Image (cartoon, grey):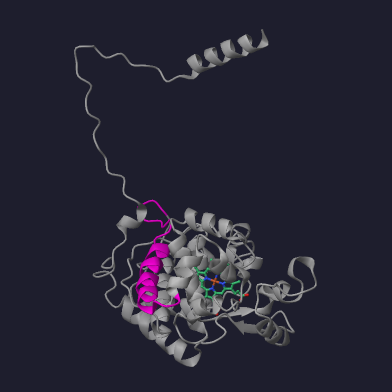
Amino acid sequence: MRRVFVIVLLHLFAKATAAPVIGRPKTLKPQAKPRVAVLPASAYLSPTYYLKSCPNLEGIIHRKVNAWVKKDYTIAPSIIRLHFHDCAVRGCDASILLNHPGSERAADASKSLRGFALIDEIKAEVERQCPKTVSCADILTAAARDTTVLAGGPFWEVPFGRKDGLVSLAKEANAVPQGHENITSLLSFFDKLGLTFVDLVVLSGSHTIGRSTCASVKQRLFNFKGTGKPDPTLDSKYSNLLKKQCRFDTTYVNLDATTPRTFDVAYYQNLGKKMGLLSTDQLLYSDSRTGSLVTLMATQPEFFSSQFAVSMVKVGNANVLTGKNQGEIRLNCNNVNH
Ligand code: HEM
């Protein structure tokens, strides 16, 4: 009896909430709906976006990046990572650069991000030459391309036209993967950015250069899952070396143990030798969804290089702001305009 009552109720509810049917004379043929192509926001980006409004833009960025990398090579991987952390939260909208309490930049997960001063210097010069024209998001994207090239990685054309966002929240930055996640959660994080398992494997390849603070790996070295021992998927000689190096949280260790300054496939080869620094790196090798691609990358430097360029364009297109009423061109990358 109760079941019948529920079914009747559901039926009535469905009727009450159904969209009204607008009658059409039966003799008339239904009209074809006009087709409106809905393009993704990234379709409005273009390598020639600033051709007229700021023709020297790429030259300015290139010169500044070059000068900084010459003085301090370690800035190159830091800019690549900064770009990823920007795109990973609210898309590539320079939200990571906003510098106020509670912003992404102030989050725990952003503590070891570097390179802000280089972006500020580029922005200041760009504002002198092309006032109120170029977004901080575009500057960061192009700087990541230039640092990749200087580190020995591939060149690609950067599509421009991103706007800068107005919102930046620390709690959102803390959702960016930090190295202790499983592959399922990495894949789902990447999926939200429009990225696939190929992009995950290929972009993680940027760990072929750069460093990590010991804070990010100490649990893996000293107390894996509360055992008081190192992670057993870590080569024992390698973990002993790391334990000696990692006396302080703030000490840096190389992400690629064998060729830390060269943009090559040694990162993937090391994973096959249980020498991935982050547990997420090592899991890429052992997980059935990503393992065969890691093994392939380890022997195919050309493929890695060309696919890296493709995946970097993809991450740079993630959830960008391009509409007339979206975002703004920030005058100073640290603050919104008003
Ligand atoms: C797949 C998920 C990823 C995880 C879990 C991850 C995690 C990390 C961690 C923990 C560090 C060291 C942070 C520290 O200093 O303590 C790091 C560094 C770095 N990451 Fe990732 N990362 C991921 C994806 C990416 C992607 C997609 C890129 C680039 C597109 C990237 C580029 C870098 C670079 C270049 C560094 C070195 C930074 C430096 O030397 O300053 N990472 N990453």
> In the image shown, does 139 or 281 lie closer to the viewer?
281
Quarter holding residue 46: bottom left
The structure residue drawn at horizontal position 19% and vertical position 12%, both measured from the top left corner, is 27
Quadrant hosting ligand 1:
bottom right
The structure residue drawn at horizontal position 43% and vertical position 84%, both measured from the top left corner, is 151
Point out residue 313 in the picture as x, y percentages from the top left corner: 37, 66
Point out residue 292 in the picture as x, y percentages from the top left corner: 47, 66
Quarter holding residue 245: bottom right
Q: Is residue 299 magenta-colored? A: yes
Q: Is residue 154 above or below residue 9?
A: below
Q: Residue furthest bottom?
A: 71
> In the image shown, does 143 or 260 lie closer to the viewer?
260
Point out residue 158 in the picture as x, y percentages from the top left corner: 33, 70
Q: Is residue 151 magenta-colored? A: no
The structure residue drawn at horizontal position 36% and vertical position 56%, both measured from the top left corner, is 322
Q: Which residues are magenta?
A: 298-326
Quarter holding residue 136: bottom left
Q: Would residue 117 be found to the left or right of residue 163 on screen?
A: right
